[in-house]
Every structure is written in C-alpha cells, then in structure tokens.
C-alpha cells in the first residue's frame, strides 16, 4: 500500500528522511529543518518569493480551482450566488459559514444597518484631505482612524467583540466610501437611509442631491449588488494576506483592515480596475488594439485586467461581469469602451503570448466599464472593490484568530548581504561604492 509521504535522500550525507504528506498535497515546510549535515546545522528552509506555492493557513471559506475556473464561497458556486443571492446574504454566508434563514437574515441586516453611521469626528477628519485626494487613500486613513473610536476592538479573543467590529466595518464601509466621494465632489455628506437596501443606501449616500428621498434605479442597484457578491472573498489574495499578517500580531481589526485596503489599492490587485479604464481610454479605438497587443507581447506593457496567480483559465467572475455590463447599459446607455475591451479579449485569446502565458480576463477587466457607465469616477473603482471585500477580510481574520496553529506571521529570509565588518572613523573610510540598490546620497 502506497505510503502518504515523501522520502528525501540528502546526497550530502546519504541520510534518508520521511516527510508525511497531509491533506493530499501538503508537506510542512518546517519538516525541512530536520534535514541537516550536522548537529549545528540550521537545517533546510523552503524559498518561495511571493508565496507562489506556499499555503499560509488552513481555511474553510473560499475554494478556487484555477484550471477549471471554479469559485465557491463555503461550497456555493459563485454563479448561483450571483443569480439568486444578495450581497448581505452572501456576506453572512462568507462570515458565518451557512446561508441564513429568514429570521437570522432579518437580524443580520438590522445589525449591519445599525452601524451605517460614523462618528461626526470622522467627517472633520475627512475634511483634512485635499479635494483631489484619492478615495482609497482616504479609506485607508479613515478605517485606521476607526480603531481610535473603538478601543475595545483590541480584545480580539473576545467573540462578541469580533462580531461587533465585523458588523461595524461592513456597516460603515459604504458610508466612508460615499463620504470620500462627496468630499472629492465638494458636496455635502448624505447620511445613511436605512429604509433602503444595503446597496441602495450606498447609492443614495453617493448620488442623492436635492430630492427628499433618493430612489435607486432597481437595475443599477441589483447590478452593483451582484458586483459586491462577486468581490466578497477570494481566499489568500494579497490584501487578505495583509489582513491576516497584520492581524497575526493581535493588532485590532480596523488597523488590519486598513492594511488590507492599502494592499488592495495596488494596481496589480484591486487597483487594476481603475488601470483597465485608463488603458482602454488610452487605446481609444478598436483599430489601435493590434498595436497595443504588440506592445504587450514585446513586454512593454501589461494588459491590465488580464492574468491571475490562481486562474489559469477564464475568471468565472469576469464572465458574470461581462453579461452584467449589457444589463446596465440598458439603463445608462452603452459605454463605447466595451467594444475595445471585447476586441482586446478576442485578439488576446487567439494570440500565442496570452495562450502560452495562460492569461485570461480577470474580475477587473470588465468591472470598470460598468462603474464608469454608472457614473463613478475611476478613482472610486478600487473603493467599490474594498466595500464588499470587507466581509471576506473579516471572515479570514476571524478564522486566523481562532486557528490554534496560527502565530505571529514572521517569514525567514535568504541572507546574501555582507558577513562581518567593523565600524571605522569617517576620516579613515574610502569613497563608498554605490550598489545598484543604494539611494543616491546627493539629495
Ligand atoms: C485581482 O489574487 C487574487 O485573488 C486577486 C483577485 C481577488 O479577487 O482578490 O482576483 C483580484 O487582483 C485580480 C488581478 C488584477 N490585476 C491585474 O489585472 C493586473 C495585470 N495582471 C498582472 O499584473 C498579473 O497577471 C497578476 C499580478 C494578476 C498575476 O501575476 P503573477 O501570477 O505573479 O504572474 P507574473 O506577474 O509572474 O506573470 C507571469 C508571466 C510574466 O511573463 P514572463 O516574465 O514570465 O515572460 O505572465 C506575464 C508576465 O509578464 N503577465 C502578463 C500579464 N500578467 C502576467 N503580461 C501581460 N499582461 C498581463 N496582465
């Protein structure tokens, strides 16, 4: 009977080591430390820049099969949730692990909406940003500032405190995001209207003007709610890794969430939806697509919205977003950039460069086209990613806090620097040789 283990022969010593294989395809990296050349040897370490092949945790929240283009939250296919669920119901599922019954859903909705208001001082804090401050920068700052309003959030081992901070963050993110948008437009802030749905209230806080009560367009409200469902969680992506890593030091969840938003802001991650629109606008016309593709194949440009660390096939979310775009256009009118995007996708999927690099549209490729059609400025696009991902970050954070195997995240390194040198008086030193990574001394 085949044994579920690896046998490693260290050719330096001829010694054999047996390392168990767990969960079907996992070996514990720390077992490599047993492989030594002698008692004083540190042992072996695995080296995995950007964690391309390293599991940092065990999780039961989201399952992705990158080759088959499968995405499931707690076992439910994303396609079914996008068709039948709502964002708040999906957030409940991601966080609690089960779909709610009617009574629990009503309680959950009420508990989240209860926390849609923010302390008035947050408004004053937000006034300190320049009018043209990127809303993601405002979001990072204001989420971290929430930490100072709720010091009890530092009791991360307290289940009720974790639940309360989770409801607060999910409830307040749309308000903070809408306030950041209104600040950039020089418009008065609109307070939450809890008679509206979670997503309808967000649209009201963004777009309400002089009318007594904002009535969200039901098609746009549903489209944005589906987009929120699609963005709720995505296992151990860069921003979730930041949430878990900062949370592992037992910092409060607001500081950890601020770090997660900061990671999401990057153009290679959640900031990609903003960069896609800038890319499509720069291409400008379908006839310029071949020239752009040539630049990408020459390695001069990235095709923003394409490629993924896990999906080596079509991101299942991108398929849903693409269909959603046409429903939104029925209300907003067609965004002509969709023609450039469809042509880019068509050519790219035929080109050997994209096929050989297994590059397909990801969730960010079509979302910006919808957001722009709905009237959002491009700087708000990553904010629309951060709002729903808050439920995923909080679920992953709580799972990390409860995991008995988890400790403070502290990776090792492969040291390549100088060995031992001694300080010398400044008059006895040669002119420093400038290494390629040294910052210029001449300011
Ligand atoms: C999200 O991780 C998640 O789950 C993220 C996310 C989530 O829901 O949380 O799904 C959300 O962040 C989606 C990704 C959004 N980012 C972009 O669209 C930016 C453009 N994409 C690339 O930067 C890239 O594809 C990444 C960052 C998404 C993935 O990068 P990897 O897995 O580290 O791959 P890589 O950078 O090592 O690239 C492998 C090769 C390279 O070529 P070679 O040097 O080997 O010749 O593929 C090339 C890359 O140059 N490549 C691209 C490309 N993406 C990869 N070439 C052109 N255009 C691209 N978009």
Image (spheres, rainbow, N blue to C red):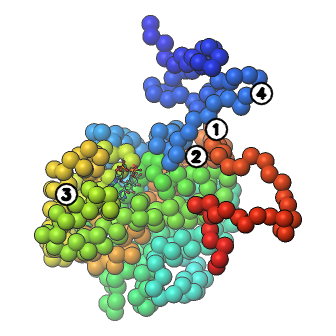
* Structural distance between the alpha carbons of marks 2 and 1: 8 Å
Residues 153 and 271: in front is 271
x then y, percent, for residue 266:
45, 64
Residue position for label 1: 404
Q: How many marks?
A: 4
* Structural distance between the alpha carbons of marks 3 and 1: 45 Å
- Which is closer to the viewer, label 2 or label 4? 4
- Which is closer to the viewer, label 3 or label 2? 3
The tag earlier along the polypeptide, 2 or 4, is 4
The tag earlier along the polypeptide, 4 or 3, is 4
Badge 2 local density, few (<14 within 10 Å), some, or many (20+)?
A: many
Badge 4 local density, few (<14 within 10 Å), some, or many (20+)?
A: few
Residue position for label 3: 345
Tag 2 and tag 4, C-beta contact below 8 Å: no
Q: From this view, report whether residue 89 is shown above or below residue 113.
A: above
Residue position for label 4: 40
Q: Element at badge 2? A: helix
Residue at the image point whose x is 24% and y is 49% from the top: 353
Whether residue 365 sits left or right of residue 87 in the image: it is left
x then y, percent, for residue 65:
34, 39
- Which is closer to the viewer, label 4 or label 3? 4
Mark 2 Cβ inside 8 Å of ligand 1: no
Residue at the image point whose x is 57% and y is 30% from the top: 28
Badge 3 local density, few (<14 within 10 Å), some, or many (20+)?
A: some
The tag on residue 400 is 2
Residue at the image point whose x is 30% and y is 39% from the top: 67
The tag earlier along the polypeptide, 3 or 2, is 3
* Structural distance between the alpha carbons of marks 4 and 3: 56 Å
């Amino acid at each position: 009977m085949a044994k579920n283990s690896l046998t490693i022969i260290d050719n330096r010593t001829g010694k054999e080591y047996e390392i168990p294989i767990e969960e079907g395809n996992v070996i514990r990296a720390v077992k490599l430390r047993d492989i030594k050349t002698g008692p004083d040897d540190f042992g072996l370490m695995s080296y995995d820049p950007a964690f391309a092949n390293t599991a940092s945790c065990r999780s039961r929240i989201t399952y992705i099969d990158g080759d088959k283009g499968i995405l499931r939250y707690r076992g439910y296919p994303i396609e079914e949730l996008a068709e039948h669920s709502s964002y708040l119901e999906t957030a409940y599922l991601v966080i609690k692990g089960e779909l709610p019954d009617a009574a629990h859903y009503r309680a959950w909705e009420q508990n989240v909406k209860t926390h849609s208001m923010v302390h008035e001082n947050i408004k004053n804090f937000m006034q300190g940003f320049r009018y043209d401050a990127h809303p993601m920068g405002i979001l990072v700052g204001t989420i971290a500032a929430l930490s100072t309003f709720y010091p009890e959030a530092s009791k991360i081992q307290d289940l009720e405190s974790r639940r309360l901070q989770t409801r607060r963050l999910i409830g307040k993110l749309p308000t903070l995001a809408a306030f950041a948008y209104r600040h950039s437009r020089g418009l008065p802030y609109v307070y939450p209207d809890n008679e509206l749905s979670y997503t309808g209230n967000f649209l009201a806080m963004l777009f309400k003007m002089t009318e007594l009560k904002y009535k969200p367009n039901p098609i746009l409200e549903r489209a944005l709610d589906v987009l929120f469902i699609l963005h709720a969680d995505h296992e151990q992506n860069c921003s979730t890794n930041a949430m878990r890593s900062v949370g592992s030091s037992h910092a409060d969840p607001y500081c950890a969430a601020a770090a997660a938003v900061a990671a999401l802001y990057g153009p290679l991650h959640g900031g990609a939806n903003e960069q896609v629109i800038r890319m499509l606008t720069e291409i400008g016309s379908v006839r310029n697509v071949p020239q752009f593709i040539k630049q990408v194949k020459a390695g001069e440009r990235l095709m923003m919205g394409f490629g993924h660390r896990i999906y080596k096939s079509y991101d299942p979310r991108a398929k849903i977003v693409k269909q959603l775009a046409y429903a939104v256009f029925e209300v907003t009118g067609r965004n002509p950039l969709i023609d450039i995007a469809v042509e880019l996708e068509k050519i790219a999927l035929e080109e050997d460069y994209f096929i050989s690099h297994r590059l397909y549209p990801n969730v960010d490729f079509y979302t910006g086209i919808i957001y722009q059609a709905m009237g959002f400025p491009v700087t708000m696009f990553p904010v629309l990613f951060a709002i729903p991902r808050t439920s995923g970050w909080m679920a992953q954070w709580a799972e990390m806090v409860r995991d008995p195997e988890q400790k403070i995240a502290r990776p090792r390194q492969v040291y390549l620097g100088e060995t031992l040198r001694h300080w010398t008086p400044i008059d006895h030193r040669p002119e420093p040789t400038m290494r390629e990574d040294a910052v210029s001394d001449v300011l």
